[in-house]
Amino acid sequence: MPRPEKARLKKTHLEEAPDSVEFSASKKYRNLPTVVLAGRPNVGKSTLFNRLLHKRRAITDPTPGVTRDPIGTDGFIAGKPLRLIDTGGFKLERSAGRGASPQSAAAENSGIIDDLVVAKTLETIKKAGLIVLLLEAGEITSEDEEFIALLRPYQKRLIVAVNKTEGGRREADSWNLLSYGFEKVFMISAEHGDNVGDLEQEIISRLDFSAVEESSIDAAHNTAEERQPIRIALLGKPNTGKSTLSNRLTSSNDSIVSDIPGTTRDVVEGSFRWKSRDFVILDTAGIRRKSKVTENIEYYSVNRAIKTINEADIVILMIDAQEGLTEQDKKIAALAHDKGRGIIMALNKWDTMPQIKNTFEAAVDRIHFFFAKMEYAPIVAVSAENGSGVDKLLSTAVTMYGQLSTRIETGRLNQALQRWLEETPPPSGPRTRFNVKYAVQSSANPVNFIFFTSRSHAVSESYIAYLRNRIRRDLGFSLIPVDIQIRASGKKDRKAP
């Protein structure tokens, strides 16, 4: 399968001089200058990242080495749009403990990941328009010195900031950094905000905004839904291929890929374009059972992964084809279902399965047997490694997004409702009798309907299931969750199960 093309929207070049351009947070821009935050572990890069963006985006924790993948986000600093990237910490002793003894397996894995993090950090720095080297107030460590030496070729693109100097703390020692040849050093506190405004002004003054382009998509030929990127969250257990698929879709290596479970900790956001549609992909940490989550960092990672359900239109649940659907997969799918998100089950590593007749059909039947509640959710066999099935996966996502965005006119809905009531009338017993007066669609994406009845408490779950199935079959919502509320005039809603 050819890799999806990178986004190429029609743009209007901003011909004015950079200082005269008026940017707006309500608009979309492309060719943004890139600012990379770099430094050794635990100097406060993620805290500064969140401070500059004025929102909590990166996970922060006192434990060194929390950030692994470069975390990039488009945002505004001092009124100017740019792409800010938080990187993993640079470790000097990153191979410590490797191969020392059988009980050092965890240390060996840590060393492997540290190598990958450092390589990814250096790769990100090479592409940066501007590098902010963050150091900690106090003595310079051997890791700092090695990193400073590595950054010599990028001196013209370098800003040096010393963190944790709130209230003038250890500023005197920090001025010694000028002996390393730096012309200017900024004393800041990422946590408290001290002097961060001065750093922001320096960043903006050192960037070139002349290549920034404003989106100008032709609204006459695109619906509102088509103008919005489809946001997809990749969720699943550890080591199911989420980062491999994310890199394939974005034609990048933004996510670190490793056989070591739990490599991804934060949400790595990327974008791509496929057949004239724009996508945003959210690569998340693997979600394990609560009983197996023992570290605070993994707890934060799992929580952040789950929260991406709220930020996505569609959840692609990555399932190891050889292992099949697990209880943990069912819990993840149920969370997405409850939020009204589109759900696609991707049976990854399908290229490793026996190539015999009806293998896929048997796998689908097994999933439907053990998880009948999600029978509406499409299942696609893919290989994130070689790209097979990815076109079908994206085609399914586009169709699903169309259903999520569909609104049914009230007149058409109630005409259909009359047919449903005639074909299967409500019960007529003294305790079970109720009349369905009319229905409205209360929202799209997520799709919600409200049915107004004479006696809301009398409407059985089986009749609600009947109405939901008819909505799916007759109104074009076959691939997505449909929420139904039963309301009696003057009373609170009854949310259908």
Image (cartoon, rainbow, N blue to C red):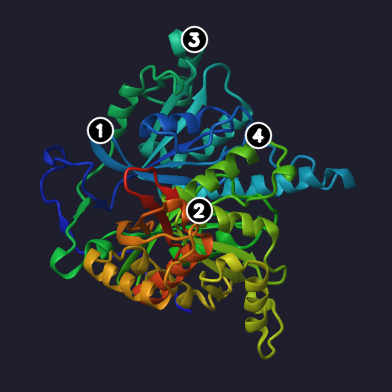
Q: Is residue 139 visible?
A: yes
Dot 4 alpha-carbon crowd within 10 angstroms: few under 14, some 14 to 19, many 20 or more:
few
Q: Which of marks 4 and 1 is in front?
A: 4
Work out how far the residue at label 4 is from the one at label 1, CA to CA, in angstroms: 39 Å
Give the number of marks.
Answer: 4
- In the drawing, does residue 159 fall left or right of residue 243? left
Q: Which residue is denoted by mark 2 in the rendering? A: 338
Mark sitting earlier along the chain (4/1): 1
Dot 3 alpha-carbon crowd within 10 angstroms: few under 14, some 14 to 19, many 20 or more:
some
Q: Which residue is denoted by mark 3 in the rendering? A: 169
Q: Which of 139 and 255 is in front in this view?
A: 255
Work out how far the residue at label 2 is from the one at label 1, CA to CA, in angstroms: 47 Å
In the rendered image, the residue lying farthest to the front is 430
Callout 2–callout 3 Cβ contact below 8 Å: no
Q: Where is residue 346 in the image (x, y as percent from the top left)?
A: 56, 69
Mark sitting earlier along the chain (2/3): 3
> What amino acid is at disc 4?
Asn
Position of residue 243 relative to residue 289, above or below, is below
Q: Is residue 254 visible?
A: no
Q: Which of 365 and 420 is in front in this view?
A: 420
> What amino acid is at disc 2?
Asp
Residue 497 has which mark? none
Q: Which residue is denoted by mark 1 in the rendering? A: 205
Q: Which residue is denoted by mark 4 in the rendering? A: 296
Q: Nearer the viewer, mark 4 or mark 2?
A: 2
Q: Where is residue 196 in the image (x, y as percent from the top left)?
A: 36, 23
Asked where in the image residue 53 lies, by quadrant, the reply is top left
Work out how far the residue at label 4 is from the one at label 2, CA to CA, in angstroms: 26 Å
Callout 2–callout 1 Cβ contact below 8 Å: no
Question: What secondary structure is marked by label 2?
Answer: helix
